[in-house]
Image (spheres, helix red, strand yellow):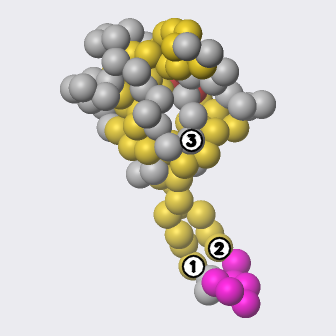
Amino acid sequence: MQKIRKGDKVVVLTGKDKGRSGEVLQVLPKEDRAVVRGVNMVKRHQRQTQAQEAGIINKEASIHLSNLAIADPQDGKPTRVGFKIDGDKKVRVAKRSGVSIDG
């Protein structure tokens, strides 16, 4: 079970976007990277297609999972993730507050 999943609120721990937070749009488990909304923005030169016109566009680039931490559901600060067996399900738990991250 992954500690960071699509839809999670995360905080950036290091790099040019340190301290910024956003929602995970995509997780790339084979590369250990994730794409986060509004974080690690890069400029891309786009060739014209039928659907899109040419120009320079801003888009999110992936960021390594080691530079991200889940935002605690209670106060929004970075927290580590633990696991707990709840009945017959394995749920993710914030180490900082002990609150369940999964729903």
Which residues are drawn in magenta?
A: 47-52
In the image, is residue 4 above or below residue 88? below
Mark 1 lies on residue: 55
Give the mark count. 3
Q: Is residue 8 above or below residue 50?
A: above
Neighbours of disc 2 within 10 Å: few (<14), some (14-19), many (20+) = few
**Residue 79 figure quarter:** top left
Answer whether residue 17 is visible to the viewer in this image: no
Q: Position of residue 1 (x, y in %)?
A: 66, 21
Other-residue count near label 1 (Cα within 10 Å), few / some / many at <14 / 14–19 / ≥20:
few
Mark toward the viewer: 3 or 2? 3
Q: Nearer the viewer, residue 103 or 65?
A: 103
Q: Main secondary structure of the magenta part?
A: loop
Please provide percent x and percent y for residue 77: 27, 24
Q: Secondary structure at mark 2?
A: strand
**Between disc 3 and disc 2, whose residue precedes?**
3
Q: Which residue, as the protein is rendered here, is positioned at the far front?
A: 87
Q: Report helix, strand or loop for mark 3.
A: loop
User: Which residue type does callout 2 highlight?
Assistant: Gln
Kind of residue indicated by mark 3: Lys
Q: CA distance from mark 3 to mark 2?
A: 26 Å
Mark 1 to mark 3 CA distance (whole Å): 29 Å
